[in-house]
Amino acid sequence: MRRTGIALLAGLFVLSIAAGGCATAPAGKSAGTGEPPSWQTSSVVEETATVMAVNQSTRMVTLKGPEGNAITFKASDEVRNLAQVQVGDVVKFAYYESLAVRVLGKGEAFPPAGESAAMSRAKPGEKPAGVVGTETSVNATITAIDMQAKTATLKGEDGKSVTVTPLRPEKLDEVKVGDRLVITYTEAVAVKVEKAEKK
């Protein structure tokens, strides 16, 4: 991710309020306990493709998806162990994202906000594999809630404000003006090449 600031803040807040009904609140943080509310939700999307062609000298690879669609691309130098890839190998993709929103308790300070990234790759000689992930956290304060218009105004630490309309406005009942939010968005992509199973 490369989005930061109030624009990201607005998008994440809308998503979190929208997903609040199906998210799981940590123990002691759910509505009705007297503790500040929190929401969390996550999802995983998985796909597979088959290697139709690979040119080791040009590093051009052609993959065919489950619907028969094909794509050709050049594997960057960051793709380790391309020499281990053969026609017929199966490439597995997984995309993970999670969103967590927490209302800070009275007297609790904002934690440091920002973005961190991590990456891991296969060892030399193994089939190519890798995981790339980022975690972005932003802090904001609710400065206004308009129940009639079903909107909330958020102010980031940079002083910029934005008004958003949650997809599930009834969740606005769980927050109030002055609440300070910590919004954490995590996404990761994992890719793994496996040898095709013998039929």
Image (tube, grey):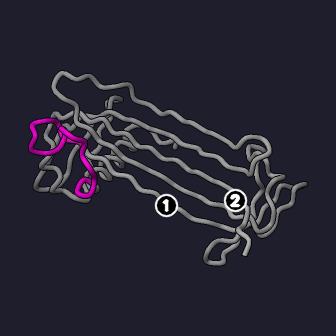
Q: For mark 1, what is the residue?
A: 45
* Magenta span contains residue 33: yes
Q: Position of residue 108 (x, y in %)?
A: 22, 23
Q: Report whether residue 110 is seen.
A: yes
**Residue 114 disc label:** none
| Distance of label 1 from label 2 (alpha carbons) | 18 Å
Task: Locate residue 110: give its quadrant.
Answer: top left
In screen coordinates, is 20 left or right of 83? left
The three-letter amino acid code for the residue at tag 2 is: Glu
What residue do we see at 13% from left, 40% from top? 176
The three-letter amino acid code for the residue at tag 1 is: Val
Badge 1 density bin: few <14, some 14–19, many ≥20, Cα 10 Å: few
Label 1's element? strand
Q: Which range of residues does the magenta coloring cover?
A: 20-38
Badge 2 density bin: few <14, some 14–19, many ≥20, Cα 10 Å: some
Q: For mark 2, what is the residue?
A: 194
In front: 170, or 45? Answer: 45
* Magenta span contains residue 172: no
